[in-house]
Image (spheres, rainbow, N blue to C red):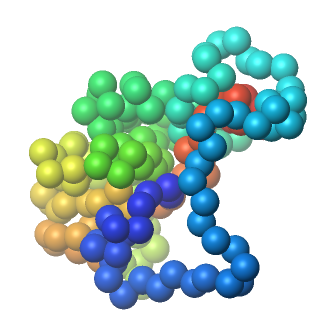
Amino acid sequence: ITTNWGYWNDAYPKSVAYQMFEKYKPIELAKVENADSVRSHGPADKRLPMHTQVVGVFHGGKTIAYRIADLEKAGGLIRDFVGGKPIVVLWYAPTGTAAVYTPEFESSKSDKSKKQVTLTPAKDGSFVDRETKSRWDIAGRAKSGPLKTRTLRWVNSVQCRWFAWAAE
């Protein structure tokens, strides 16, 4: 998922970030597009404006893109079926993070059967499942409740601009 280090470090303080080479330094994002980059885009897909932020999903052999603006309007959660399989598209506004999961988890390490959850957004940005009232974060991990430490199954997805998703 795409998020920011401050959020991630608060949520997962034992995380480690590596800086591979000293010669690579962070730089500010460009204010205008680079002409070479624009030429490399190829023909624009007119279904959406090219710079629309989306989360693109590949699941069950099918693809779909969800506009980030629609996630915000939906209150941070969209339930859908892609390739005949259920998914949940989650949105965490403070970091601008979208993530996609199947609404299921393994019941235990020894029992690999899948258990379903029905998530709803909470006011604090977490997601609560109807079945156990466990709280899940944008990373798909139960942070409290009876399912604490369980994880949702991630769905192949990427948060990007429409032109990049449509080109793929």
Q: Quadrant of residue 46?
A: top right
- Is 126 situated above or below 66? below
Residue 109 in picture, x, y percent from top left:
41, 83
Residue 12 in picture, x, y percent from top left:
33, 77
Is 132 placed left or right of 52 in the picture?
Answer: left
Residue 150 in picture, x, y percent from top left:
33, 72
In front: 109, or 5?
5
Say if residue 40 shows up in the picture.
yes
In front: 21, or 75?
21
Name which residue lies at 55% across and 44% down: 159
In front: 165, or 85?
165
Name which residue lies at 60% across and 60% down: 27
Q: Quadrant of the C terminus?
A: top right
Is 91 placed left or right of 124 in the picture?
Answer: right
How many marks on residues? 0
Name which residue lies at 61% across and 82% down: 19
Say if residue 151 shows up in the picture.
no
Is 24 placed left or right of 142 in the picture?
Answer: right
Name which residue lies at 74% across and 18% down: 45
Residue 136 in picture, x, y percent from top left:
26, 60
- Is 55 situated above or below 8? above
